[in-house]
Amino acid sequence: MNMTLNVSLAERTYPILIGGALLDRSELILPHLAVKRAAIVSNETVAPLYLERLAAGLANSGVQLTRIVLPDGEQFKNWETLNRIYDALLEARCDRGTAIIALGGGVVGDIAGFAAATYQRGVPFVQVPTTLLSQVDSSVGGKTGINHPRGKNMIGAFWQPRLVLADTDTLKTLPARELSAGLAEIVKIALVRDLPFLEWLEENMDKLLAGDAAALAHAIGRSCRNKAEVVAADEQETDPAGGRALLNLGHTFGHAIETGLGYGQWLHGEAVAAGTVMAAELSHRLGWLAEVDVARVRRLFVRARLPVRGAALGAARYLDLMGHDKKVVAGRLRLVLLRQLGHAVTWADAPQTEIIAAIEACSG
């Protein structure tokens, strides 16, 4: 069953289309192109599977195409790879009307989106996410960027797509580890603001792991609906009470894991899962969650085949890396924590001793 959701922003609204066999429907993309010219950015894993299938429909509709295939992996989300996109666009003489279409997972979407935001000061952008994580999270909301050796996603821009086209059939070729990584972001959004969804996940996790199409479609749609509502209310994460920042539950700890180990050692969703357990443990130490709540969070991630203990970096290294986080304001680290399951808050007053205790209890 196909569905359409909308991200409603102050200046414009754009659709999220979710369903099967959408890659073959070029007519869904055409209205969102400024002119009949586009550059498809993909990677060496996804391109052999889906690039020509997407390109065929567009080319048959008269769209002039440039194909850009990048190396696959978080470790390539950097300036060098970004410049490969710029070089290809310039070599093909792509102008400001040329749309950039991101075909792939979160890394492709982030780096292609940043290229779209900055090439000739901004060109149209379309997201065609092919992983569960990108379909439920990174393709929605307009965050784009690249990594820096000192911090993940530290260089980037807000650049909203004109369309998100999530073909759920692409999940049939997704490795089990990547599927689990996507489930981490689904669990996260439920913990942040949707307790009934969390209860649904507890009942249906086995179906999701088995690739049940109806269960996956429901989880993707509900996750996107939740995120679209948050983004519409706080597009550029400026709400001091939390707003869009709440979607970063587990990410401050998780980004420290990714950066500390070296990009690509852990998948993003794996780091988010372990980081969310740390956030839940800290929430318990602040008196907000009961032990049974933390156990419930841990148990759901274990069922999703995700790590619940962070890398053994040492608390001092975690704190150093977390100090570079984008949520540091005026020298104070704002963490996203859980007042209760289904209700996240931003908090800048957690004692460092308790942060260290939570890290040590949930890592190594």
Image (spheres, helix red, strand yellow):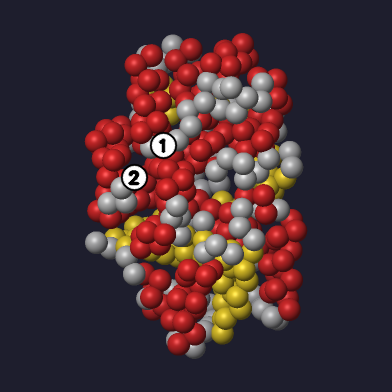
Q: Is residue 171 visible?
A: yes
Q: Amino acid at mark 2?
A: Leu
Q: Front-most of 18 and 75?
A: 75
| Secondary structure found at label 2 | helix
Q: Which residue is mark 1?
A: 305
What's the CA distance linking mark 1 and mark 2?
9 Å
Query: Which residue corresponds to the image point at 49% horizontal and 85% vertical from the top-left?
Result: 59
Query: Which residue corresponds to the image point at 66% horizontal and 21% vertical from the top-left?
Result: 314
Residue 209: which disc?
2
Counting from the top left corner in percent of width and height, residue 354 is at 57, 13
Above/below status of 353 relative to 10: above
| CB under 8 Å between discs 1 and 2 | yes
Query: Which residue corresponds to the image point at 61% horizontal and 53% vertical from the top-left?
Result: 73
- Alpha-carbon neighbours of circle 2 within 10 Å: few (<14), some, or many (≥20)? some
Counting from the top left corner in percent of width and height, residue 255 is at 61, 36
- Alpha-carbon neighbours of circle 1 within 10 Å: few (<14), some, or many (≥20)? some
